[in-house]
Image (cartoon, rainbow, N blue to C red):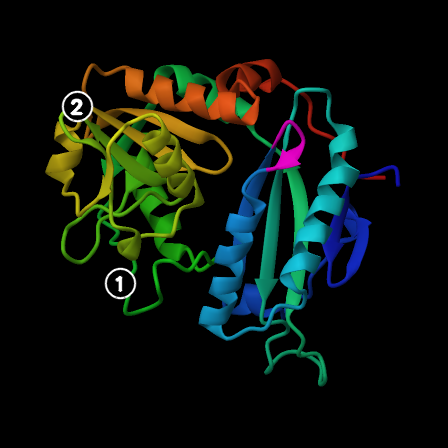
């Protein structure tokens, strides 16, 4: 095949031919359970951990997976193997896996009720992160509150994200380029629309909001093990905006870029106002474990052209 592939409902096909009907529940109701993965040196990272969360999400919404766990793992590996040949040596891919309940019953033709499953890869947007690794990012508390757990479990990774969209729009109007940090109904910080929050206190160690109150972050899962192997104290507890402001360092954790340093919070410098030594230590150690210099990779491939998606 001379173009990148996607996987959709049991079939590998050219990415440009992978289409969903407009009456799919993922569009009509936003009922999409999803996972975002990435490769390091061409190999999928934490695939088993991501699949565990995906299958837990499907169980939560009562949708049976169209594939067994082993089958899903195999299809993901096959898709990455097919598409990574488009990359230059040293580059890496992102992978999206999604499942929906299938066609929405009041709009779809009769008999089309099977769940929808799809996978596609994408070029990691290193041009968005390369400068942020070096200069950091800014955070601002959003007036848009996180969705209460009484609506759906916060551990569910899904595409019902209007609150995230509104939070991003609000923060961009106030401070262009900043990222929103959401709080819950009790006023404790939770996460950003695309990343988990980690605070570092020199006297305490790494602290993140309780997993019971946030998405079960696969990145935090990995950082915990990484930090503990380095002798760094790790714990979870409720964090207030005041806690964030007083932290020695603050970081954002997300699968595609791993870690980013936060240098400004609520329009005020955090710590030294520059990426700190704990961030540098963690991302360097992470890179050593996966045999990729994460920051150098972003610098090397920030200007690479995107793969042509049409035949």
The tag on residue 263 is none
Q: Is residue 31 above or below residue 70?
A: below
- Relative to the observer, which residue lies in front, 226 or 82? 226
In this rendering, position of residue 112 left or right of residue 175: right
Q: Which residue is mark 2?
A: 202
The rendered magenta stretch, by its main secondary structure, is classed as strand
Residue drawn at 17 percent across, 47 percent down: 238
Which of the two labelled residues, at mark 1 and mark 2, occupies the earlier sequence position? Answer: 1
Determine which quarter of the picture holds residue 161: bottom left
Q: Magenta includes 144?
A: no
Q: Position of residue 284 (x, y in %)?
A: 43, 19
Question: For the residue carrying disc 2, how many other residues have a C-alpha within 10 Å: few (<14), some (14-19), or many (20+)?
Answer: few
What kind of element bears circle 2?
A: loop
Q: Magenta includes 41?
A: yes
Q: Tell me which segment is drawn in magenta.
A: 40-44
Residue drawn at 64 percent across, 27 percent down: 41
Identify the residue at the far bottom of this view: 110
> Where, quadrant-wise, is the C terminus in this rendering?
top right
The tag on residue 148 is 1
Residue drawn at 46 percent across, 26 percent down: 286
Distance, label 1 to label 2, CA atoms, is 32 Å
What kind of element bears circle 1?
A: loop
Q: Is residue 202 above or below residue 154?
A: above
- The answer to whether residue 30 is visible is no
């Amino acid at each position: 095949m001379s173009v990148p592939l996607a996987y959709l409902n049991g079939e590998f096909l050219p990415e440009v031919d992978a289409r969903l009907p407009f009456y799919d529940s993922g569009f009509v109701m936003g009922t999409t359970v999803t996972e975002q993965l990435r490769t390091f040196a061409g190999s999928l990272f934490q695939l088993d951990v991501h699949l565990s969360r995906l299958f837990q999400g499907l169980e939560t919404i009562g949708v049976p997976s169209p594939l067994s766990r082993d089958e899903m793992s195999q299809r993901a590996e096959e898709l990455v193997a097919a598409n990574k040949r488009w990359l230059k040596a040293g580059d890496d891919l992102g992978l999206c896996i999604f499942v929906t309940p299938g066609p929405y019953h009041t709009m779809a033709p009769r008999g089309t009720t099977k769940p929808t499953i799809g996978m596609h890869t994408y070029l990691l947007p290193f041009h968005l992160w390369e400068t942020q690794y070096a200069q950091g990012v800014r955070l601002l508390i959003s007036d848009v509150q996180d969705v209460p757990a009484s609506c759906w479990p916060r551990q569910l990774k899904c595409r019902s994200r209007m609150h995230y969209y509104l939070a991003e729009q609000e923060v961009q109007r106030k401070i262009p380029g900043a990222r929103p940090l959401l709080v819950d109904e009790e006023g404790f910080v939770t996460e950003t629309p695309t990343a988990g929050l980690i605070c570092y206190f020199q006297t305490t160690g790494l602290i993140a909001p309780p997993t019971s109150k946030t998405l079960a972050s696969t990145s935090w899962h990995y950082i915990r093990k990484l930090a503990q192997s380095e002798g760094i104290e790790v714990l979870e507890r409720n964090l207030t905006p005041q806690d964030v402001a007083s932290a020695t360092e603050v970081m954002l954790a997300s699968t595609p870029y791993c870690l980013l340093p936060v240098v400004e919070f609520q329009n005020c410098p955090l710590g030294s106002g520059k990426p700190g030594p704990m961030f540098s230590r963690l991302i360097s150690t992470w890179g050593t474990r996966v045999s990729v210099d994460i920051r150098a990779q972003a610098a090397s491939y920030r200007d690479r052209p995107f793969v042509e998606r049409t035949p």
